[in-house]
Image: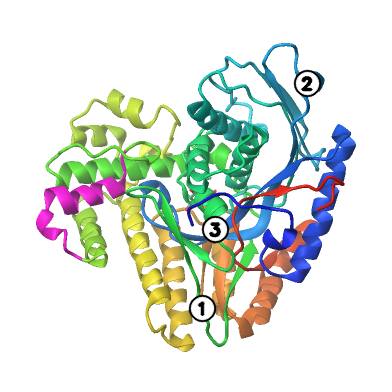
Amino acid sequence: MSGIVPTTTTLADVYPADADEVAFQQQRWTKLVDTFAATHGHKPTFVSRSPGRVNIIGEHIDYSLFSVLPMAIAADVLLAVSTPSPSSSSSGDDSFKITISNVQTDKFPGAEFTVSPSATEIEIDRSHHHWSNYFKAGLKGAMGLLRQKHGDEFRFKSMNVVMDGNVPPGGGLSSSAAFVTASALAVLVANGETEVDKVKLTELAIVSEREVGVNSGGMDQSASVLSERDAALFVSFTPSLSARPVRFPQTTPELVFLIAQTFVRSAKFDTAPYRYNLRVVECTLAAAILNADCNNSSPLPRDSSPLGISLHGFFDSYFTTTNPSLSNLTLQEKFTKAISLTEESLTQEKGYTLDEIATHLHLPVSDLQKTYLTKFPAKPPQNLFLLRQRALHVFRESLRVLRFMHLLEQNPPSSSSDIGPSLGRLLTDSQSSCRDDFDCSCAEIDSLVDIGRRAGAYGSRLTGAGWGGCTIHLVPADRVEQVKKAFDDEYYSKIEMSEEERASRVVVTKPGPGSCVFWVSEEGKV
Ligand code: NG1
Protein backbone atom coordinates (compact mmCIF):
# COMPACT_ATOMS: atom_id res chain seq x y z
CA MET A 1 0.00 0.00 0.00
CA SER A 2 2.94 2.32 0.36
CA GLY A 3 4.43 4.06 -2.65
CA ILE A 4 3.55 6.96 -4.87
CA VAL A 5 0.05 8.35 -5.54
CA PRO A 6 -0.81 6.95 -8.99
CA THR A 7 -1.19 9.21 -12.00
CA THR A 8 -3.35 8.27 -14.96
CA THR A 9 -5.03 9.46 -18.13
CA THR A 10 -7.85 6.93 -18.17
CA LEU A 11 -11.00 6.80 -16.05
CA ALA A 12 -11.03 3.00 -16.06
CA ASP A 13 -8.09 3.21 -13.60
CA VAL A 14 -9.98 5.53 -11.28
CA TYR A 15 -13.20 3.68 -10.45
CA PRO A 16 -14.26 0.18 -9.40
CA ALA A 17 -14.31 -2.06 -12.50
CA ASP A 18 -17.85 -1.48 -13.79
CA ALA A 19 -18.73 -0.25 -17.29
CA ASP A 20 -21.83 1.69 -16.13
CA GLU A 21 -19.86 3.46 -13.43
CA VAL A 22 -17.13 4.49 -15.88
CA ALA A 23 -19.71 5.75 -18.43
CA PHE A 24 -21.44 7.80 -15.73
CA GLN A 25 -18.11 9.24 -14.60
CA GLN A 26 -17.12 10.13 -18.17
CA GLN A 27 -20.10 12.50 -18.36
CA ARG A 28 -19.48 13.93 -14.93
CA TRP A 29 -15.78 14.59 -15.59
CA THR A 30 -16.49 16.13 -18.99
CA LYS A 31 -18.93 18.52 -17.32
CA LEU A 32 -16.31 19.45 -14.73
CA VAL A 33 -13.68 20.16 -17.39
CA ASP A 34 -16.20 22.21 -19.41
CA THR A 35 -17.25 24.21 -16.34
CA PHE A 36 -13.60 24.89 -15.58
CA ALA A 37 -12.97 26.09 -19.14
CA ALA A 38 -16.05 28.33 -19.05
CA THR A 39 -14.96 29.85 -15.72
CA HIS A 40 -11.27 30.35 -16.39
CA GLY A 41 -11.01 30.51 -20.18
CA HIS A 42 -8.64 27.55 -20.39
CA LYS A 43 -8.78 23.85 -19.61
CA PRO A 44 -7.48 22.42 -16.32
CA THR A 45 -4.06 20.77 -16.35
CA PHE A 46 -4.99 17.98 -14.00
CA VAL A 47 -7.69 16.66 -11.69
CA SER A 48 -6.84 15.62 -8.13
CA ARG A 49 -9.23 12.89 -6.99
CA SER A 50 -9.86 11.39 -3.53
CA PRO A 51 -12.71 9.02 -2.66
CA GLY A 52 -15.04 8.79 0.32
CA ARG A 53 -15.12 5.60 2.35
CA VAL A 54 -17.36 3.31 4.31
CA ASN A 55 -16.12 1.79 7.49
CA ILE A 56 -16.81 -1.94 7.68
CA ILE A 57 -15.87 -2.36 11.33
CA GLY A 58 -13.87 -0.49 13.98
CA GLU A 59 -15.98 2.54 14.86
CA HIS A 60 -14.71 5.43 16.99
CA ILE A 61 -11.49 3.62 17.82
CA ASP A 62 -9.08 5.26 15.35
CA TYR A 63 -8.46 8.28 17.60
CA SER A 64 -7.55 5.84 20.38
CA LEU A 65 -5.05 4.43 17.82
CA PHE A 66 -6.62 0.97 17.45
CA SER A 67 -6.84 -0.69 14.01
CA VAL A 68 -9.86 -0.30 11.73
CA LEU A 69 -11.20 -1.87 8.51
CA PRO A 70 -12.69 0.67 6.05
CA MET A 71 -12.85 0.60 2.24
CA ALA A 72 -12.86 3.37 -0.38
CA ILE A 73 -16.05 3.87 -2.43
CA ALA A 74 -16.73 5.32 -5.88
CA ALA A 75 -18.18 8.63 -4.57
CA ASP A 76 -15.38 11.19 -4.47
CA VAL A 77 -14.06 14.74 -4.54
CA LEU A 78 -12.62 15.99 -7.84
CA LEU A 79 -10.56 19.17 -7.99
CA ALA A 80 -9.80 20.41 -11.49
CA VAL A 81 -6.70 22.61 -11.34
CA SER A 82 -4.60 24.99 -13.41
CA THR A 83 -1.70 27.15 -12.35
CA PRO A 84 -2.19 30.49 -14.14
CA SER A 85 0.95 32.18 -15.41
CA PRO A 86 2.39 34.79 -12.99
CA SER A 87 1.41 37.76 -15.19
CA SER A 88 -2.28 36.95 -14.97
CA SER A 89 -2.39 36.46 -11.22
CA SER A 90 0.45 38.01 -9.28
CA SER A 91 0.23 41.39 -7.69
CA GLY A 92 3.85 42.15 -8.35
CA ASP A 93 5.25 40.51 -5.26
CA ASP A 94 5.63 36.82 -4.56
CA SER A 95 2.19 36.37 -3.07
CA PHE A 96 -0.01 33.72 -4.61
CA LYS A 97 -3.72 33.57 -5.19
CA ILE A 98 -6.21 30.72 -4.90
CA THR A 99 -9.49 30.99 -6.79
CA ILE A 100 -11.83 28.17 -5.86
CA SER A 101 -15.37 27.50 -7.03
CA ASN A 102 -17.77 24.59 -7.08
CA VAL A 103 -19.85 23.14 -9.91
CA GLN A 104 -22.84 23.67 -7.60
CA THR A 105 -22.47 27.44 -7.39
CA ASP A 106 -25.76 28.18 -5.62
CA LYS A 107 -25.08 25.71 -2.85
CA PHE A 108 -21.36 26.41 -2.51
CA PRO A 109 -20.39 30.00 -3.40
CA GLY A 110 -16.84 30.47 -4.63
CA ALA A 111 -13.95 32.05 -2.71
CA GLU A 112 -10.71 33.81 -3.53
CA PHE A 113 -7.78 34.48 -1.27
CA THR A 114 -4.24 35.73 -1.57
CA VAL A 115 -1.42 34.39 0.56
CA SER A 116 1.74 36.40 1.12
CA PRO A 117 5.00 34.46 0.75
CA SER A 118 5.99 35.27 4.32
CA ALA A 119 2.74 33.83 5.70
CA THR A 120 3.68 31.08 8.10
CA GLU A 121 0.05 30.29 8.79
CA ILE A 122 -3.00 29.99 6.57
CA GLU A 123 -5.85 31.50 8.50
CA ILE A 124 -8.80 29.16 8.92
CA ASP A 125 -11.71 30.90 10.54
CA ARG A 126 -13.40 28.16 12.54
CA SER A 127 -16.16 30.50 13.68
CA HIS A 128 -17.21 31.01 10.05
CA HIS A 129 -17.60 27.55 8.56
CA HIS A 130 -17.17 28.06 4.79
CA TRP A 131 -16.75 24.93 2.62
CA SER A 132 -13.42 26.26 1.33
CA ASN A 133 -11.99 25.85 4.87
CA TYR A 134 -11.35 22.23 3.92
CA PHE A 135 -9.27 23.37 0.94
CA LYS A 136 -7.36 25.74 3.21
CA ALA A 137 -6.68 22.87 5.62
CA GLY A 138 -5.16 20.81 2.80
CA LEU A 139 -3.26 23.86 1.51
CA LYS A 140 -1.79 24.52 4.93
CA GLY A 141 -0.56 20.93 5.30
CA ALA A 142 0.88 20.81 1.79
CA MET A 143 2.67 24.16 2.25
CA GLY A 144 4.28 22.77 5.41
CA LEU A 145 5.55 19.73 3.51
CA LEU A 146 6.84 21.78 0.57
CA ARG A 147 8.67 24.19 2.87
CA GLN A 148 10.16 21.28 4.78
CA LYS A 149 11.49 19.89 1.52
CA HIS A 150 12.56 23.07 -0.30
CA GLY A 151 13.15 25.54 2.53
CA ASP A 152 11.32 28.70 3.62
CA GLU A 153 12.20 30.53 0.40
CA PHE A 154 9.98 28.23 -1.65
CA ARG A 155 7.55 30.21 -3.83
CA PHE A 156 4.08 28.76 -4.26
CA LYS A 157 2.08 28.80 -7.48
CA SER A 158 -1.29 30.52 -7.80
CA MET A 159 -4.08 28.06 -8.49
CA ASN A 160 -7.49 28.03 -10.17
CA VAL A 161 -9.60 25.25 -8.72
CA VAL A 162 -13.07 23.96 -9.58
CA MET A 163 -14.54 21.27 -7.37
CA ASP A 164 -17.10 18.57 -8.00
CA GLY A 165 -17.88 16.35 -5.01
CA ASN A 166 -20.52 13.64 -4.78
CA VAL A 167 -19.82 12.28 -1.30
CA PRO A 168 -22.89 13.49 0.64
CA PRO A 169 -21.77 15.96 3.35
CA GLY A 170 -22.63 14.75 6.86
CA GLY A 171 -23.51 11.35 5.40
CA GLY A 172 -20.91 9.32 7.29
CA LEU A 173 -18.99 8.59 4.07
CA SER A 174 -16.17 10.92 4.88
CA SER A 175 -16.70 13.82 2.51
CA SER A 176 -14.41 16.03 4.59
CA ALA A 177 -11.41 13.70 4.46
CA ALA A 178 -11.89 13.21 0.70
CA PHE A 179 -11.86 17.00 0.29
CA VAL A 180 -8.82 17.63 2.50
CA THR A 181 -6.74 14.85 0.90
CA ALA A 182 -7.71 15.92 -2.64
CA SER A 183 -6.79 19.53 -1.74
CA ALA A 184 -3.40 18.69 -0.26
CA LEU A 185 -2.65 16.48 -3.28
CA ALA A 186 -3.71 19.27 -5.67
CA VAL A 187 -1.42 21.81 -3.99
CA LEU A 188 1.54 19.42 -4.02
CA VAL A 189 1.11 18.56 -7.71
CA ALA A 190 0.48 22.19 -8.72
CA ASN A 191 3.77 23.08 -7.06
CA GLY A 192 5.81 20.55 -8.97
CA GLU A 193 5.62 17.39 -6.85
CA THR A 194 5.02 14.78 -9.49
CA GLU A 195 5.74 11.86 -7.16
CA VAL A 196 3.65 12.25 -4.02
CA ASP A 197 4.33 9.73 -1.27
CA LYS A 198 1.03 8.14 -0.20
CA VAL A 199 1.87 7.79 3.49
CA LYS A 200 3.19 11.37 3.74
CA LEU A 201 0.03 12.67 2.04
CA THR A 202 -2.15 10.66 4.46
CA GLU A 203 -0.25 11.83 7.52
CA LEU A 204 -0.41 15.45 6.51
CA ALA A 205 -4.13 15.19 5.70
CA ILE A 206 -4.85 13.71 9.16
CA VAL A 207 -3.17 16.62 10.91
CA SER A 208 -4.59 19.18 8.45
CA GLU A 209 -8.17 18.10 8.93
CA ARG A 210 -7.96 18.83 12.64
CA GLU A 211 -7.44 22.50 11.67
CA VAL A 212 -11.06 22.68 10.58
CA GLY A 213 -12.29 22.07 14.11
CA VAL A 214 -12.81 18.35 14.58
CA ASN A 215 -10.30 16.23 16.48
CA SER A 216 -10.52 13.39 14.00
CA GLY A 217 -8.69 10.08 13.95
CA GLY A 218 -6.84 8.87 10.85
CA MET A 219 -9.15 6.25 9.37
CA ASP A 220 -10.81 8.34 6.67
CA GLN A 221 -7.70 9.90 5.21
CA SER A 222 -5.97 6.48 5.20
CA ALA A 223 -8.89 4.85 3.39
CA SER A 224 -9.12 7.73 0.94
CA VAL A 225 -5.45 7.69 -0.06
CA LEU A 226 -4.25 4.13 0.52
CA SER A 227 -7.13 1.93 -0.66
CA GLU A 228 -6.75 -0.53 -3.52
CA ARG A 229 -9.36 -1.73 -5.98
CA ASP A 230 -11.42 -4.75 -4.83
CA ALA A 231 -10.02 -4.77 -1.31
CA ALA A 232 -10.90 -3.43 2.11
CA LEU A 233 -8.04 -1.76 3.99
CA PHE A 234 -6.75 -2.87 7.38
CA VAL A 235 -5.28 0.31 8.87
CA SER A 236 -2.94 0.40 11.89
CA PHE A 237 -1.77 3.59 13.55
CA THR A 238 1.06 2.23 15.70
CA PRO A 239 4.04 2.10 15.83
CA SER A 240 3.47 4.21 12.71
CA LEU A 241 0.74 4.49 10.10
CA SER A 242 0.52 1.36 7.96
CA ALA A 243 -2.18 -0.39 5.96
CA ARG A 244 -2.69 -3.53 3.94
CA PRO A 245 -5.40 -4.61 1.51
CA VAL A 246 -7.76 -7.34 2.72
CA ARG A 247 -9.84 -9.29 0.23
CA PHE A 248 -13.15 -10.90 1.07
CA PRO A 249 -13.33 -14.66 0.49
CA GLN A 250 -15.22 -15.87 -2.59
CA THR A 251 -18.42 -17.40 -1.30
CA THR A 252 -21.64 -18.73 -2.79
CA PRO A 253 -23.77 -16.69 -2.60
CA GLU A 254 -21.36 -13.78 -2.81
CA LEU A 255 -21.07 -11.37 0.15
CA VAL A 256 -22.37 -7.91 -0.74
CA PHE A 257 -22.25 -4.63 1.18
CA LEU A 258 -25.31 -2.40 0.92
CA ILE A 259 -25.09 1.21 2.06
CA ALA A 260 -28.42 2.71 3.08
CA GLN A 261 -28.72 6.41 3.90
CA THR A 262 -30.77 7.66 6.82
CA PHE A 263 -30.85 11.15 5.28
CA VAL A 264 -30.32 12.52 8.76
CA ARG A 265 -27.47 14.97 8.31
CA SER A 266 -24.97 14.80 11.10
CA ALA A 267 -23.29 18.20 11.16
CA LYS A 268 -20.03 17.01 12.67
CA PHE A 269 -18.50 20.46 13.04
CA ASP A 270 -21.52 22.15 14.69
CA THR A 271 -22.21 19.29 17.09
CA ALA A 272 -18.55 18.54 17.87
CA PRO A 273 -18.54 19.96 21.45
CA TYR A 274 -21.16 17.49 22.64
CA ARG A 275 -20.61 14.66 20.17
CA TYR A 276 -17.42 13.90 18.24
CA ASN A 277 -14.88 16.04 20.08
CA LEU A 278 -16.45 15.12 23.42
CA ARG A 279 -15.95 11.43 22.63
CA VAL A 280 -12.27 12.11 21.87
CA VAL A 281 -11.94 13.85 25.25
CA GLU A 282 -13.79 11.05 27.08
CA CYS A 283 -11.57 8.33 25.58
CA THR A 284 -8.46 10.35 26.42
CA LEU A 285 -9.53 10.97 30.04
CA ALA A 286 -10.43 7.28 30.40
CA ALA A 287 -6.86 6.46 29.29
CA ALA A 288 -5.47 8.84 31.91
CA ILE A 289 -7.49 7.26 34.74
CA LEU A 290 -6.80 3.68 33.68
CA ASN A 291 -3.14 4.59 33.54
CA ALA A 292 -3.22 6.13 37.01
CA ASP A 293 -4.97 3.05 38.42
CA CYS A 294 -3.15 0.25 36.61
CA ASN A 295 0.26 1.53 35.52
CA ASN A 296 1.67 2.77 38.85
CA SER A 297 1.05 6.31 37.67
CA SER A 298 4.04 6.30 35.34
CA PRO A 299 3.24 8.93 32.70
CA LEU A 300 1.55 7.78 29.51
CA PRO A 301 3.77 7.96 26.43
CA ARG A 302 2.94 10.82 24.02
CA ASP A 303 1.59 9.55 20.73
CA SER A 304 -0.07 10.69 17.49
CA SER A 305 -3.64 10.65 18.88
CA PRO A 306 -5.48 14.02 18.75
CA LEU A 307 -4.80 14.92 22.40
CA GLY A 308 -1.41 13.23 22.64
CA ILE A 309 -2.25 10.31 24.95
CA SER A 310 -4.60 7.44 24.19
CA LEU A 311 -6.22 4.20 25.28
CA HIS A 312 -3.74 2.44 22.99
CA GLY A 313 -0.91 4.10 24.90
CA PHE A 314 -2.37 2.78 28.16
CA PHE A 315 -2.84 -0.70 26.66
CA ASP A 316 0.71 -0.84 25.36
CA SER A 317 2.28 0.39 28.61
CA TYR A 318 0.22 -2.05 30.67
CA PHE A 319 1.31 -5.10 28.69
CA THR A 320 4.90 -4.12 27.94
CA THR A 321 6.24 -1.85 30.70
CA THR A 322 4.07 -2.47 33.77
CA ASN A 323 3.55 -6.20 33.28
CA PRO A 324 6.24 -7.56 30.97
CA SER A 325 5.22 -11.07 32.08
CA LEU A 326 1.94 -10.53 30.20
CA SER A 327 3.56 -9.46 26.96
CA ASN A 328 3.21 -12.98 25.53
CA LEU A 329 -0.57 -13.02 25.83
CA THR A 330 -2.37 -13.12 22.49
CA LEU A 331 -3.91 -9.87 21.33
CA GLN A 332 -7.32 -11.40 21.99
CA GLU A 333 -6.33 -12.18 25.60
CA LYS A 334 -4.94 -8.69 26.05
CA PHE A 335 -8.20 -7.07 24.92
CA THR A 336 -10.16 -9.36 27.26
CA LYS A 337 -7.89 -8.29 30.12
CA ALA A 338 -8.23 -4.59 29.18
CA ILE A 339 -12.01 -4.98 29.31
CA SER A 340 -11.91 -6.42 32.82
CA LEU A 341 -9.44 -3.73 33.97
CA THR A 342 -11.88 -1.10 32.70
CA GLU A 343 -14.79 -2.74 34.53
CA GLU A 344 -12.78 -2.77 37.77
CA SER A 345 -11.26 0.70 37.48
CA LEU A 346 -13.94 2.88 35.87
CA THR A 347 -16.84 1.82 38.05
CA GLN A 348 -19.08 4.91 37.83
CA GLU A 349 -21.89 4.09 35.40
CA LYS A 350 -23.41 7.55 35.90
CA GLY A 351 -20.22 9.25 34.68
CA TYR A 352 -17.52 11.47 36.20
CA THR A 353 -17.42 15.20 36.85
CA LEU A 354 -14.26 17.09 35.92
CA ASP A 355 -13.62 17.58 39.67
CA GLU A 356 -13.77 13.84 40.25
CA ILE A 357 -11.39 13.19 37.37
CA ALA A 358 -8.98 15.86 38.62
CA THR A 359 -9.01 14.39 42.13
CA HIS A 360 -8.37 10.92 40.74
CA LEU A 361 -5.41 12.18 38.71
CA HIS A 362 -4.09 14.44 41.53
CA LEU A 363 -4.22 17.42 39.19
CA PRO A 364 -5.86 20.84 39.45
CA VAL A 365 -9.04 21.12 37.35
CA SER A 366 -7.41 24.05 35.51
CA ASP A 367 -4.65 21.71 34.26
CA LEU A 368 -7.22 19.28 32.87
CA GLN A 369 -9.09 22.13 31.25
CA LYS A 370 -5.96 23.46 29.65
CA THR A 371 -4.64 20.11 28.40
CA TYR A 372 -7.80 18.45 27.18
CA LEU A 373 -10.59 20.99 26.82
CA THR A 374 -9.06 24.15 25.41
CA LYS A 375 -8.17 23.54 21.75
CA PHE A 376 -11.61 22.10 21.10
CA PRO A 377 -14.18 22.74 23.82
CA ALA A 378 -16.20 19.72 24.95
CA LYS A 379 -19.46 20.13 26.84
CA PRO A 380 -20.86 16.89 28.27
CA PRO A 381 -24.55 16.80 29.09
CA GLN A 382 -25.05 17.26 32.86
CA ASN A 383 -21.28 17.83 33.09
CA LEU A 384 -20.68 14.09 33.31
CA PHE A 385 -18.01 12.35 31.23
CA LEU A 386 -19.04 8.74 30.54
CA LEU A 387 -15.57 7.24 30.75
CA ARG A 388 -16.53 3.66 31.58
CA GLN A 389 -18.91 3.19 28.64
CA ARG A 390 -16.54 4.83 26.15
CA ALA A 391 -13.50 2.77 27.16
CA LEU A 392 -15.52 -0.47 27.20
CA HIS A 393 -16.72 0.27 23.67
CA VAL A 394 -13.18 0.96 22.44
CA PHE A 395 -11.68 -2.29 23.80
CA ARG A 396 -14.66 -4.45 22.79
CA GLU A 397 -14.82 -2.94 19.31
CA SER A 398 -11.08 -3.47 18.85
CA LEU A 399 -11.56 -7.12 19.81
CA ARG A 400 -14.34 -7.37 17.21
CA VAL A 401 -12.03 -5.97 14.52
CA LEU A 402 -9.50 -8.64 15.44
CA ARG A 403 -12.11 -11.41 15.24
CA PHE A 404 -13.44 -10.06 11.95
CA MET A 405 -9.92 -10.12 10.48
CA HIS A 406 -9.37 -13.69 11.76
CA LEU A 407 -12.55 -14.81 10.01
CA LEU A 408 -11.50 -13.15 6.75
CA GLU A 409 -7.97 -14.44 6.81
CA GLN A 410 -8.41 -17.92 8.21
CA ASN A 411 -6.86 -20.52 5.99
CA PRO A 412 -8.72 -22.33 4.48
CA PRO A 413 -11.68 -19.93 4.73
CA SER A 414 -14.71 -21.36 6.46
CA SER A 415 -17.60 -22.29 4.18
CA SER A 416 -19.85 -19.50 2.92
CA SER A 417 -22.66 -20.74 5.11
CA ASP A 418 -20.55 -20.05 8.23
CA ILE A 419 -18.59 -16.96 7.39
CA GLY A 420 -21.47 -14.62 6.41
CA PRO A 421 -23.44 -15.10 9.64
CA SER A 422 -20.26 -14.97 11.75
CA LEU A 423 -19.11 -11.70 10.19
CA GLY A 424 -22.68 -10.41 10.43
CA ARG A 425 -22.88 -11.10 14.17
CA LEU A 426 -19.78 -8.97 14.74
CA LEU A 427 -21.34 -6.09 12.77
CA THR A 428 -24.53 -6.38 14.75
CA ASP A 429 -22.64 -6.41 18.08
CA SER A 430 -20.73 -3.36 16.91
CA GLN A 431 -24.02 -1.55 16.33
CA SER A 432 -25.30 -2.43 19.83
CA SER A 433 -22.10 -1.12 21.37
CA CYS A 434 -22.24 2.10 19.29
CA ARG A 435 -25.86 2.59 20.36
CA ASP A 436 -25.61 1.67 24.04
CA ASP A 437 -22.06 2.39 25.18
CA PHE A 438 -20.84 5.00 22.70
CA ASP A 439 -24.21 6.67 22.24
CA CYS A 440 -23.55 7.57 18.59
CA SER A 441 -26.61 6.00 16.95
CA CYS A 442 -30.03 7.60 16.44
CA ALA A 443 -33.62 6.42 15.91
CA GLU A 444 -33.32 6.43 12.10
CA ILE A 445 -30.14 4.33 12.14
CA ASP A 446 -31.70 1.90 14.63
CA SER A 447 -34.71 1.59 12.36
CA LEU A 448 -32.74 0.87 9.13
CA VAL A 449 -30.50 -1.58 10.95
CA ASP A 450 -33.52 -3.42 12.30
CA ILE A 451 -35.24 -3.52 8.89
CA GLY A 452 -32.07 -4.80 7.21
CA ARG A 453 -31.61 -7.63 9.65
CA ARG A 454 -35.25 -8.71 9.58
CA ALA A 455 -35.16 -8.74 5.75
CA GLY A 456 -32.16 -11.08 5.59
CA ALA A 457 -28.91 -9.14 6.10
CA TYR A 458 -26.26 -11.15 7.98
CA GLY A 459 -25.46 -8.05 10.00
CA SER A 460 -26.09 -4.30 9.96
CA ARG A 461 -24.63 -1.26 11.65
CA LEU A 462 -24.02 2.46 11.38
CA THR A 463 -20.89 3.47 9.50
CA GLY A 464 -18.73 6.51 10.22
CA ALA A 465 -19.26 8.91 13.07
CA GLY A 466 -22.99 8.11 13.43
CA TRP A 467 -25.76 10.33 14.85
CA GLY A 468 -27.25 10.11 11.34
CA GLY A 469 -25.48 9.45 8.05
CA CYS A 470 -25.29 5.95 6.61
CA THR A 471 -25.83 2.36 7.60
CA ILE A 472 -23.95 -0.63 6.19
CA HIS A 473 -25.45 -4.10 5.72
CA LEU A 474 -23.68 -7.37 4.91
CA VAL A 475 -26.07 -9.27 2.68
CA PRO A 476 -25.85 -12.53 0.70
CA ALA A 477 -26.20 -11.61 -3.01
CA ASP A 478 -29.43 -13.59 -3.38
CA ARG A 479 -31.16 -11.46 -0.71
CA VAL A 480 -30.13 -8.01 -1.93
CA GLU A 481 -33.43 -7.28 -3.67
CA GLN A 482 -35.56 -8.33 -0.70
CA VAL A 483 -33.50 -6.19 1.69
CA LYS A 484 -33.76 -3.18 -0.65
CA LYS A 485 -37.51 -3.67 -0.94
CA ALA A 486 -37.87 -3.78 2.83
CA PHE A 487 -35.96 -0.47 3.11
CA ASP A 488 -38.34 1.10 0.60
CA ASP A 489 -41.52 -0.31 2.17
CA GLU A 490 -40.64 0.35 5.78
CA TYR A 491 -38.37 3.42 5.71
CA TYR A 492 -38.07 5.40 2.48
CA SER A 493 -41.79 5.35 1.67
CA LYS A 494 -42.33 7.22 4.95
CA ILE A 495 -39.91 10.12 4.46
CA GLU A 496 -39.59 13.07 2.05
CA MET A 497 -36.70 12.74 -0.42
CA SER A 498 -35.42 14.84 -3.32
CA GLU A 499 -34.91 13.12 -6.69
CA GLU A 500 -31.18 13.11 -6.07
CA GLU A 501 -31.67 11.50 -2.67
CA ARG A 502 -34.05 8.92 -4.06
CA ALA A 503 -31.44 7.87 -6.62
CA SER A 504 -28.73 7.39 -4.00
CA ARG A 505 -30.76 6.02 -1.08
CA VAL A 506 -29.32 2.50 -1.21
CA VAL A 507 -26.18 1.51 -3.10
CA VAL A 508 -24.24 -1.70 -3.48
CA THR A 509 -20.63 -0.75 -2.86
CA LYS A 510 -17.59 -2.28 -4.42
CA PRO A 511 -14.23 -1.38 -2.91
CA GLY A 512 -12.50 1.12 -5.18
CA PRO A 513 -8.99 2.53 -5.50
CA GLY A 514 -7.70 5.49 -3.47
CA SER A 515 -6.49 8.97 -4.49
CA CYS A 516 -4.96 9.66 -7.89
CA VAL A 517 -3.90 12.45 -10.20
CA PHE A 518 -5.52 12.53 -13.64
CA TRP A 519 -3.69 14.46 -16.38
CA VAL A 520 -6.17 16.19 -18.67
CA SER A 521 -5.22 15.97 -22.37
CA GLU A 522 -4.20 19.02 -24.41
CA GLU A 523 -7.64 19.05 -26.01
CA GLY A 524 -9.33 18.94 -22.61
CA LYS A 525 -10.54 15.35 -23.06
CA VAL A 526 -11.08 12.98 -20.15
P1 NG1 B 1 -16.94 10.55 9.51
O1 NG1 B 1 -17.50 11.69 10.25
O2 NG1 B 1 -17.90 9.50 9.25
O3 NG1 B 1 -16.17 10.96 8.29
C1 NG1 B 1 -15.41 10.26 11.74
C2 NG1 B 1 -13.90 10.49 11.80
C3 NG1 B 1 -13.11 9.19 11.73
C4 NG1 B 1 -13.63 8.18 12.75
C5 NG1 B 1 -15.16 8.04 12.58
C6 NG1 B 1 -15.76 7.12 13.61
C7 NG1 B 1 -13.27 12.60 10.74
C8 NG1 B 1 -12.74 13.25 9.52
N1 NG1 B 1 -13.47 11.31 10.68
O4 NG1 B 1 -15.80 9.85 10.45
O5 NG1 B 1 -11.74 9.45 11.95
O6 NG1 B 1 -13.29 8.54 14.05
O7 NG1 B 1 -15.82 9.29 12.68
O8 NG1 B 1 -15.22 5.85 13.54
O9 NG1 B 1 -13.51 13.26 11.74
Q: Distance between the residues labelled 2 and 1?
A: 57 Å
Q: Mark 2 points at which residue?
A: 89
Identified at 44% across, 75% down, the residue is 423
Image location of residue 334, percent across then percent down? 22, 61
Horizontally, residue 327 falls left or right of residue 450, namely left
- In the picture shown, does residue 349 fall above or below 365? below
Q: In this view, does 21 lie above or below 76?
A: below
Identify the amino acid type marked 2: Ser
Q: Residues within 10 Å of mark 2 (few under 14, many from 20)?
A: some
Residue 469 in the figure: left or right of residue 355: right
Q: What element carries label 1?
A: loop
Q: Mark 1 is on which residue type?
A: Tyr
Of badges 2 and 1, the one in the foreground is 2
Residue stretch in magenta: 309-329
SS state under label 2: helix
User: Of helix, strand and loop, which one carries label 3?
Assistant: loop
Q: How would you classify the magenta stretch by its main secondary structure?
A: helix
Numbered mark located on residue 458 in the image: 1
Mark in front: 3 vs 2 = 2
Seen at 28% across and 25% down, the residue is 367
From the top left corner, tell me how far across and down residue 203 is, in percent: 47, 42
Q: Ligand 1 within 8 A of label 2's CB?
A: no
- Badge 3 crowding class, 10 Å Cα cut-off, few under 14, some 14 to 19, many 20 or more, is many
Label 3 beta carbon within 8 A of ligand 1: no
Please state the horizontal and vertical placement of residue 223, each as a whole percent of the image: 53, 54
Answer above or below: position of 175 versus 450. above
Residue 318 is a magenta residue: yes
Q: Give the residue at mark 3.
A: 227
